[in-house]
Image (cartoon, rainbow, N blue to C red):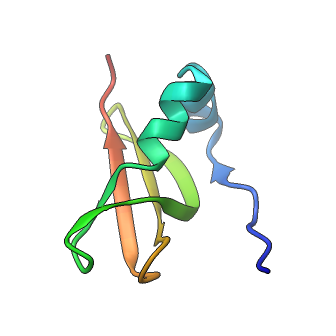
Amino acid sequence: MTVESLPTFTRPARQRWESIPADIRQRLLANVWCGQCRHGVTITNFSGTVKGGDLLLVGKCAECHGDVARVIERA
């Protein structure tokens, strides 16, 4: 059994992430494109920053452990 670390967020990223309802956050984390697996996967061991006004999550694919990212555009 592995223990996952808590996500590391910049302060603006944490505020943006926490403003998203919990059920939507779970759907976003479970639907990240992995270029290596060639389908949607769950992101693990991720961190968050705000880039160009958008929230950027960077982490690992739950299946192949390759690098993945998810951009959540500002509303």
Task: Work out whether residue 38 or residue 15 is closer to the camera in this orientation and state it.
Answer: 38
Task: Work out whether residue 53 or residue 43 is closer to the camera in this orientation and state it.
Answer: 43
Q: State the image coordinates of residue 20 (x, y, percent, origin top left).
A: 53, 22
Report the residue at 48% width, 47% height from top.
29
Report the residue at 23% width, 65% height from top.
39
Q: State the image coordinates of residue 53 (x, y, percent, origin top left).
A: 34, 31
Residue 42 in the figure: left or right of residue 13: left
| On-image quarter of the C terminus | top left
| On-image quarter of the N terminus | bottom right
Report the residue at 67% width, 54% height from top.
8
Count of number-bearing discs: 0
Residue 52 in the figure: left or right of residue 56: left
Residue 61 in the figure: left or right of residue 75: right
The image quadrant that residue 22 belongs to is: top right
Report the residue at 75% width, 56% height from top.
6
Task: Work out whether residue 14 or residue 42 is closer to the camera in this orientation and state it.
Answer: 42
